[in-house]
Amino acid sequence: MHRILFLQPVRKTSVRSSCRRIGVAVAVLCAAVILQGRVATANFDVHGTSSTRAEAIVRHAEQVRERAFETLLGASAPSPWTVRCEIHLHATEESFAEAVGGPPDGARGATAIEFAEAGICVRRIDLMDDDPAAVPDALAHELVHVILADHFTTAPPPRWADEGLAVLFDDEAKQAGHARDFAAARRAGMTWSASHLLAMEEYPREPHRQRVFYGQSAALVRWLIDQRGAATLLSFLDDAAAIGEGAALERHYGFSTVAALERAWLSQPAETDIGVD
Ligand SMILES: [Zn+2]
């Protein structure tokens, strides 16, 4: 069994997000039932808020789950999870930090997945929930990590792809913040080469570099999807793990090297290649 955890730190004074992966999940809405202070549906089990608010959150989560399964994995009617995704809401940073084991300051979300021989045995998302008028802002992003874990069962996807795909489910303001971070880094010559980005196994330590990482990863993911769709991107990621990145790149995108991919990608102006859909 192993455990994966992703954190999504966001400065409270900013709409920008910088999600650090240390993990990944979600499902279909059935009638919500209240069980011992929590609200559960077929795929979610929400803890830490009123039943009325929990019901609104699980409805949203079920919608995001369906959209993400269809958009990213081509599954228009995903089967319910046999292991529900727990969503734990935290009104304070102290409660959140205690639950996830001491995240960086300003974290907004974290996801943990545990695998057993029979498959995923734990899906858990912890979210800051300090705006009672809104669905927690990190929910959709964290759900994408969880859903991708259903596909990448033998090994997690590369960090750039995992985070880049999750960012595409952030709200427009967050995505715009990531795009600005990447555009500024390009102007300053502070981006990573594509070969470096694709090989990164750890998140940058410095918060400002984390933001560039998310912005650059999202921009590359968006560009690849614009070229040949999400299904091809997922096939590329699968094949890269099986036959190597170079062969997979040639097979699915027709580039002989990562450098050729980078030239094609960055030949576009920053304003158009990182724009928010
Ligand atoms: Zn993330």
Image (cartoon, rainbow, N blue to C red):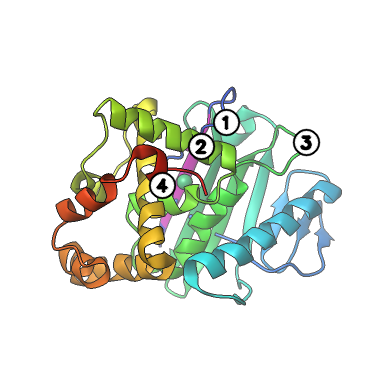
Magenta segment, which residues?
3-10
Point out residue 23 in the picture as x, y percentages from the top left corner: 44, 51
Q: CA distance from mark 2 to mark 4?
A: 11 Å
Q: Residue at x 62, y 42 (%)?
A: 127
Task: Indicate which disc residue 123 carries.
Answer: none
Percent from the top left, x then y, of residue 236?
30, 67
- Pointer 2 residue: 176
Q: Residue furthest top?
A: 13
Residue 15 bears which disc, if any? 1
Residue 245: quarter of image: bottom left
Eye-nearest disc, 3 or 2:
2
Report the residue marked by disc 3.
132
Q: CA distance from mark 3 to mark 4?
A: 29 Å
| Mark 2 or 4, nearer chain start | 2
Characterize the local packing of mark 4: few (<14), some (14-19) or many (20 or more) Cα atoms within 10 angstroms.
Answer: many
**Percent position of residue 73, x then y:** 48, 70
Element type where label 4 sits in the image:
helix
Q: Nearer the viewer, mark 3 or mark 1?
A: 1
- The residue under the point 41% across, 31% down is 181
- Residue 98 seen in this snapshot: no
